[in-house]
Amino acid sequence: MRYLLMISADEQVAADAIAEGAFADFTDWIEDLRRRGVLRVHEGLRPSPTATTVRVRDGEVLLTDGPFIEGREQVGGLAIVEVADLDEAIAIAAGHPATRIGQVEIRPLRDGTGGTRAA
């Protein structure tokens, strides 16, 4: 089963933690997933002020600079893992260094779609 792991935290707390070397074990976490063959994707996101949010209301395209939902905690990255079950996804998420300062939300991906990729 494939799961999306959405990694989020307060961006300033995350920046401070990275600067202090708190995520030194991140490389070990990634390499473990690669060795096990369960990691499909892991990508970090640029800070939330670089976001553009698009909504369409009554046929009008509305753009918002930054995230639509203002909050201290923002999604900072994502991973897709393919594992046997939710328990394995939870164990993987719990090992992510970001869980020490934020959280990782796990969502199953829909079966059968296979995903689409831009050319």
Image: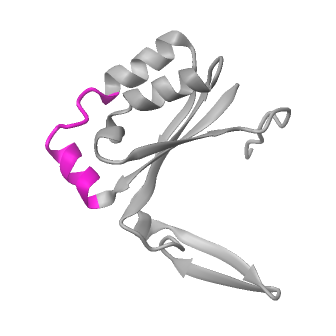
Viewer-proximal residue, 63 or 99? 99
**Residue positioned 50% across, 70% down in the render:** 67
The residue nearer to you, when weighing 42 against 100, is 100
Which of the 4 image quadrants contains residue 44? top left
Residue 40 part of the magenta segment: no
Magenta-highlighted stretch: main secondary structure? helix
Q: Answer with the quarter of the image where residue 40 lies.
A: top right
**Compared with residue 47, is residue 49 higher up or lower down, i.e. above or below?**
below
Q: Which of 60 and 98 is in front in this view?
A: 98
Residue ranking furthest to the right: 112
| Left or right of residue 116, residue 103 in this image | left
Residue 45: percent from left, percent from top: 45, 51
The structure residue drawn at horizontal position 56% and vertical position 23%, both measured from the top left corner, is 87
Image color mode: one colour
* Residue 68 horizontal/vertical position (percent): 54, 74
- State whether residue 73 is above or below residue 116: below
Q: Which residue is drawn at 41% across and 24% down?
A: 30
Note whether 84 is above or below 114 in the view shown: above
Q: Quadrant of the C terminus?
A: top right
Which residue is at the far left?
A: 20
User: Where residue 117 appears, x then y in whole percent?
Assistant: 73, 42
Q: Is residue 36 above or below residue 111?
A: above
Q: Where is residue 85 in the image (x, y as percent from the top left)?
A: 64, 21
What's the magenta region? 12-26
Residue farthest to the top, as pictured = 35
Q: Quadrant of the N terminus?
A: top right
65 horizontally vs 110: left or right: left
Q: Residue 51: in sight, yes or no?
A: yes
